[in-house]
Amino acid sequence: MAFIAVAVFLTAYAFIAADRVNKTVVALAGAAAVVILPVISSDDIFYSRETGIDWDVIFLLLGMMIIVSVLRQTGVFEYIAIWAAKRAKGSPLRIMILLVLVTAVASALLDNVTTVLLIAPVTLLVCDRLDISAAPFLMAEVFASNIGGAATLVGDPPNIIIASRGGLTFNSFLLHLAPIVAIVIAAFIAMLPRLFPGSFAVDAERVADVMALEEGEAIRDRGLLIKCGLVLAAVFAAFIGHSALHLEPSVVALLGAGVLILTSGLERSDYLSGVEWETLLFFAGLFVMVGALVDTGVIATLAKAATAVTSGNALLTTMGILGVSAPVSGIIDNIPYVATMTPIVAELSTTLPTNSHPDALWWALALGADFGGNLTAVGASANVVMLGIARRADNPISFWEFTRKGIVVTAVSVALTAVYLWLRYFVFG
Amino acid sequence: MRAQEIAEDFPVVSIDSNALEAAKLLAEHRLPGIVVTDSLGKPYAVLPASQVVRFIVPGYVQDDPSLAGVLSETVADRSAEKLRGKTVRDVLPEHLRDVPAADADATVIEVAAMMARLHSPLIAVVKDGELRGVITASRLLAAALRV
């Protein structure tokens, strides 16, 4: 049975990595194969915490997607981005820095692809007014989005999987990941002039065009904005107060989504517009395939092998997870990678003999997978979406143009992360 | 009643002609669209006025309509400048190219069906490959209602 589970998994993984067939179809076909053969039972799929579909992940994603669908109707994001561009007084470098900060913060609260879809039109507008190429700005934003998304439990789908499988709270993510994300963002901002040389020359007359933008006009529905603000504040307060409220993040997100559906007065097509049903099914398929690997003991064997390779050394294992996660996530989708790695890391965190900080392994996985998304143009869904937007806007960004800069950004991010993990958990921990 | 009986003379533009001049033609004559001919003078496409309007709306506003209001009045008034230096080919989207023309012997229903299917405000009428005129939606209605 273990052989069948591995064969199905590797075949599906190869198809997902090749990106020739719809990845949701591949994941569901793989799931169907392990059920039919049968490697895993329906009880294992639907009711087991260890081997089944992680409903917390699925419903947290669904709830947040609905909340974001409603939030998008308000125009608040456009307001903030234009306000920031005007505060930069038309200086392209300052505009880039402020848009990077807006993107990083938004990505920590919202899904990265949504953030990119929201920031890109505003960026194109500002660059059009300044008569400068938008490509460097779009690239800087997508890098910031992948970095910023690592800061919270809901910022990036891999974090949601890691939180659920590792039993980690929203506050743990904030306390352990937000500091390093802030450091990496600061380093990234310092790198911007060298990363995008010659991108900041602008005609003084064009600056007036940016200053003339009327950001207040972006707000479409003030009443809806207030409702969204209240619900979002309540949702994040409940995420933070998880230990006192005993409400799982998925339940909080669904309750928030439900309140917004009832109070927003929006049509079903509007509040469901941001729900990516295919992504949810993709997750379900992955969980079933990985569940089969857990059920047949493959994951436990892999964890033992990993322990043997690092001789049970916690620091070496942490750095190993970080060092492998970043390049692998840069080449293949980080969601299947993290879905596969979480049971291995769960096993390692309980079996490593000298591990005084078992969560360090989870943080290494989260940071490696999230930051690794910047490595290549196909490393994260947000990169692919942004490149598509750039192409349609006649500001094409080639694969190598993105990847050359992505390698630098990822190398710096991972180096800083390695130092952070070492200092925080192995020197001062 | 056949297509050639209700076809009217109508200005045409070549695919490589100036887009700004084509837009001026549409504006000055209040035309719903204009027939575009290929380099041999044969009907090639229909350029609806709505498509020209869509072209002058920046892509980022089409992606995010809430940005339409943030542009100042002065900038909005200059929006047609986007057509400067462009040809009709640049403005014509892929799906409106190689649009079929109605045969001179087509009935009113055939022309109406084609107009509805193509979402086109006008249909070129050809005979033996040569342009014989154009039927607009209002001309078609007038013929159908016999007014």
Image (spheres, coloured by chain):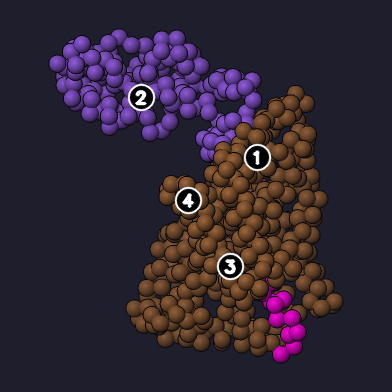
Name the amino acid, label 2. Ala
Hue used for the chain lettered B: purple
Q: How far apart are marks 4 and 1 (CA)?
A: 21 Å
- The secondary element bearing badge 1 is classed as helix
Q: Do callouts 2 and 4 point to residues on the same chain?
A: no
Q: Is residue B67 above or below residue A223?
A: above
Identify the subunit bearing mark 3.
A
Residue behind mark 4: A271
Residue density around tag 3, few if under 14, some if 14–19, many if 20 or more, within 10 Å: many
Identify the subunit bearing mark 1.
A
Residue behind mark 2: B45
Residue behind mark 1: A79
Does residue A106 appear in this view? Answer: yes
Looking at the colours in the rendered structure, which chain would you say is drawn in brown?
Answer: A
Residue density around tag 4, few if under 14, some if 14–19, many if 20 or more, within 10 Å: many
Q: Do callouts 2 and 1 point to residues on the same chain?
A: no
Report which quarter residue B77 is drawn in.
top right
